[in-house]
Image (spheres, coloured by chain):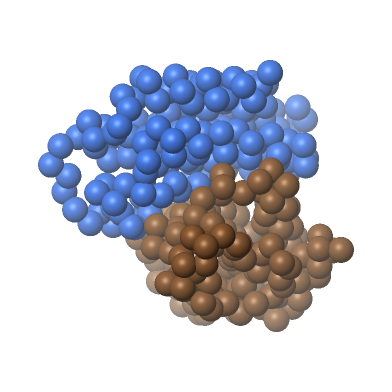
Chain colours: A brown, B blue
C-alpha cells in the first residue's frame, strides 16, 4: 500500500470499519450484507485497498472484482427470482470502491425507480418476509458461491 | 440469437433503436452518449444482444463489456478530472443490459446524490460549458479509446 493510500485510509469509513455484516472476504475484497428494510437482499462488495475508481484496478483485479459481483448476482437470481438485479458503483459520498448488488422486485417500495429515487408505494408487510429464502440462508448461499471463487 | 431473444427484442426499445448518439460499436456492444443537460458527460454501453442481466454474459463477454466500460471511464477521468465516476446497470424500466458511465462533479445539480436522487442545487450556467473538453472532442476521445479495444 502506498503512503497516499495509507493517509487516505485514516479518514475513510470503509478503511476503518467493515461497513456491514461480513459474509465473505479475501485479501482483495469483502462482501457485506446491507441492512435495509426496503431492500433486504442487498449486498455490497468492498475493495479492501483504498481505491476510488474501478478503472484504477489492474485487469486481473477488475476481473476478480466482477467475478465476485457476478457470483453474488447469480445467487440472488437463482434463490429469489427477483424482477431485476441492480449493480452500481457510485462512491460519491465514500470514494472507496464498493459495488452495490441489489435484488429488486416489482412489489418493492421503489420499483422501477432506482433505490436512490422516490418511493412509489407503501409495503404492507416487511419486505424481508416476502423473500423466497430467509436472509441467513441467503447469506450462506452467497458465502458458498464466493468461497468457490476464492479457492 | 435464440428465438426467445428474438421475440423479446420486438418489444424492447434498445433492440429497436440505438438509444442515443452512437459513439462507437462492435458486434457485442454499442456506446452512445446520453443527452442530459444536468449530466453532459454521460455515456451508455448497450449490449447488442437482448440480455437482461450482466451475469448472463459468458466470462469472455463480461470481460469485453467491462473493458469497454473501463475504457470510457478512463477517458472521462483524464479528460475531465471529475469528482467521481458513477457506473451502474439497473434496467428496471428497460431490462436489456446497458451500463451507465457518468462523470460527476461536486458542482453538478445532484452531487453527491445519485443522478436518480433529489437535485440539491440550481446550476447557473449549462453544465456542458463547465466541462474541460467540448462534448464533440470528448466523444472523439471515447471513440478512439473504444476503437483501440476493438482491434
Q: Residue at x 24, y 49 (%)?
A: B107
For residue A139, which quarter of the picture? bottom right
Q: Which quadrant holds the N terminus of chain A? A: bottom right
For residue A94, which quarter of the picture? bottom left
Q: Residue at x 69, y 34 (%)?
A: B64
Q: Residue at x 81, y 60 (%)?
A: A149
Q: Which quadrant holds the C terminus of chain A? A: bottom right
Q: Residue furthest left?
A: B124
Q: Please state which of residues B13 and A67 is positioned toward the viewer in this rendering.
A: A67
Q: Please state which of residues B92 and B45 is positioned toward the viewer in this rendering.
A: B45
Residue B11 is at least partly visible in this image = no
Q: Please state which of residues B142 and A2 is positioned toward the viewer in this rendering.
A: A2
Residue A2 is at least partly visible in this image = yes
- The spot of residue B87 in percent (x, y) is 50, 47
- The spot of residue A29 in percent (x, y) is 66, 64
Q: Please state which of residues B129 and B9 is positioned toward the viewer in this rendering.
A: B129
Image side of residue A67 versus residue B71, left or right:
right
- The spot of residue A36 in percent (x, y) is 50, 75
- The spot of residue B70 in percent (x, y) is 57, 39
Q: How many marks?
A: 0
Can you say whether B122 is above or below B143 in the image?
A: below
Image side of residue B42 versus residue A78, left or right:
left
Can you say whether B104 is above or below B20 in the image?
A: below
Q: Residue at x 66, y 46 (%)?
A: A58
Amino acid at each position: 500500500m502506498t503512503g497516499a493510500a495509507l493517509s487516505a485510509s485514516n479518514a475513510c469509513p470503509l478503511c476503518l470499519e467493515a461497513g456491514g455484516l461480513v459474509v465473505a472476504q479475501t485479501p482483495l475484497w469483502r462482501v457485506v450484507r446491507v441492512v435495509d428494510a426496503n431492500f433486504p437482499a442487498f449486498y455490497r462488495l468492498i475493495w479492501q485497498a483504498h481505491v476510488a475508481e474501478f478503472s484504477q484496478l489492474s485487469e486481473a483485479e477488475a476481473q476478480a472484482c466482477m467475478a465476485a459481483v457476478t457470483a453474488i448476482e447469480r445467487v440472488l437470481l437463482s434463490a429469489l427470482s427477483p424482477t431485476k438485479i441492480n449493480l452500481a458503483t457510485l462512491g460519491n459520498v465514500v470514494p472507496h470502491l464498493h459495488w452495490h448488488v441489489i435484488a429488486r422486485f416489482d412489489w418493492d417500495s421503489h420499483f422501477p425507480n432506482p433505490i436512490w429515487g422516490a418511493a412509489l408505494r407503501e409495503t404492507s408487510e416487511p419486505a424481508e418476509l416476502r423473500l423466497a429464502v430467509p436472509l441467513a440462508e441467503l447469506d450462506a448461499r452467497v458465502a458458498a458461491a464466493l468461497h468457490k471463487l476464492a479457492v
